[in-house]
Amino acid sequence: MSYHNRSKLQQGGGFTLLEVLVALIILGLATVFLSTTISESLFRASKVDDDDRATTLADSLLDQLGLDVPVQPGITSGLAGNLVWRLLVEPYPNPTNPVQLDLVNLTILTKSNHLIGHWTTLRVAARATEQ
């Protein structure tokens, strides 16, 4: 094998150090991008799950109002999994309406005090009338 043939083999035989480093940098950036995207997707899925459970809890609590949950002026609160709920019932001031109404405010938070939702409704007061 002549000197001329040996130099041709050595020239085209692989990648340079610079090419390998550029490829590793591109691979590293792609990995960081993918891990960030996956992490953000998992966080959003967790938030959607909390919102879904809070909505289900709110529906349940408002349906049970007057049955399992008392309808009396004041604050009632409780814990359901990692959700904290607070129910505020107060008389609704409406002097022109002969029917007594209660204003019901339901607030649901996470244990870390992050507000998930707030619901407001009116209910017919179930208190005894004064005579």
Image (cartoon, rainbow, N blue to C red):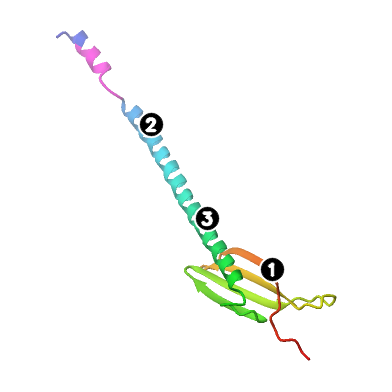
Q: Are marks 2 and 3 in contact (CB under 8 Å)?
A: no
Going by the image, does 119 lie left or right of 38? right
Residue 21, compared with residue 112, is above or below; it is: above
Going from N to C along the chain, the mark reached first, 2 or 3, is 2
Residue bearing mark 3: 48
Q: Quadrant of residue 19?
A: top left
* 3D distance between C-alphas at marks 2 and 3: 39 Å
Of the residues shown, which amino acid type is indicated by label 2? Answer: Val
Indicate whether residue 9 is drawn in magenta.
Answer: yes
Going from N to C along the chain, the mark reached first, 1 or 3, is 3
Residue 81 position within the rendered picture, expressed as x and y whole percent measured from the top left: 47, 69
Going by the image, does 38 lie left or right of 124? left
* 3D distance between C-alphas at marks 2 and 1: 61 Å
Residue at 75% across / 76% down in the picture? Answer: 92
Residue 101 position within the rendered picture, expressed as x and y whole percent measured from the top left: 74, 76
* 3D distance between C-alphas at marks 1 and 3: 24 Å
Q: Are marks 1 and 3 in contact (CB under 8 Å)?
A: no
Local secondary structure at mark 2 = helix
Q: Label 3: few (<14), some or many (≥20) within 10 Å?
A: few
Residue bearing mark 1: 121
* Camera-side residue of 121 and 21: 121
Q: Quadrant of residue 28?
A: top left
Residue bearing mark 2: 22
Going by the image, does 127 lie left or right of 4? right
Q: Which residue occupies the extreme left position in the image?
A: 1
Q: Label 1: few (<14), some or many (≥20) within 10 Å?
A: few
